[in-house]
Image (spheres, grey):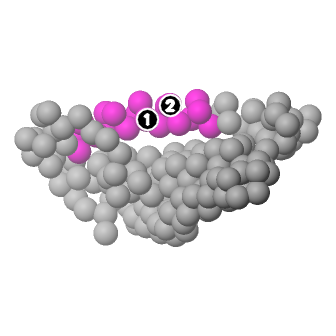
Amino acid sequence: MPKAIKIYVRYVEAVNRKIGKATMYLIFVMMGILLLSSFSRIAFNVPFNWTLEMSQFTMAAYYLLGGGYSMMLKGHVRMDLLYERWSPKRRAVTDLLTSFCLIFYLLILLYGAYSSTEYAIKYGETKHSAWAPYMWPIKLIMSFGIVLMLLQAIAEFFRDLAAARGESIT
């Protein structure tokens, strides 16, 4: 594989590794928000109207920002009825074919995320609730997470291409 592709794969994986490891701690942030909500309601009978939505936003950031890292670690679900029995080269060829579908899907998702984020920023979109938070921060985070997954999908494509050719990217 050309040196530029190897550098691309290493750089994308380094970025996804750093962001993914930092993102892992968002689960504790979400748990803290939910504990605060429960504690305030039970102990003081004072429910906060922002905790449910904030925990939802935190969870969305958690799984979208961690998506590229999960993809890099091969943590996504696979139907391995036949896949595990195949040779590494045949798996790589199959993964190459399915990569096109994934990249196409992520491009469509990114287009929708971009237009939705642009709309939220332009018109100051808020969520229709008592708290009424602005939507652009979470939409921007979601768009960034989709970009990370797209970059990782392209890196995986290059890894599979190298494996199909009997080479390695390391």
The answer to whether residue 90 is visible is no
With respect to residue 50, does 116 lie above or below?
above
Residue under the image location 40 percent in, 64 percent down:
6
How far apart marks 1 and 2 lie (CA) works out to 5 Å
Q: In this orientation, which residue lies closer to the viewer: 7 or 10?
A: 10
Residue 44 magenta-drawn?
no
Amino acid found under the numbered disc labelled 1: Leu
Q: Position of residue 102 (x, y in %)?
A: 43, 35
Eyeballing the image, is 153 above or below 113? below
Q: Residue at 27% of width from left, 53% of height from top?
A: 162
Q: Where does the image place residue 134, in percent across and percent down from the top left?
A: 84, 43
What is the magenta segment's predominant secondary structure? Answer: helix
46 or 56: which is nearer to us?
Answer: 46
Q: Is residue 95 magenta?
A: yes
> Which label belongs to residue 105?
2
Is there a contact, CB below 8 Å, between mark 1 and mark 2? yes
Q: Which mark is residue 102?
A: 1
Is 6 left or right of 115, judged from the image as shown?
left
**Mark 1: few, some, or many residues within 10 Å (few <14, many ≥20)?**
some
User: Is residue 49 something one can see in this rendering?
Assistant: yes
Residue 160 pos. (x, y %): 29, 49
Image check: 37 left or right of 68? Answer: right
| Helix, strand or loop under label 1 | helix
Q: Magenta part of the protein: which range?
A: 92-110
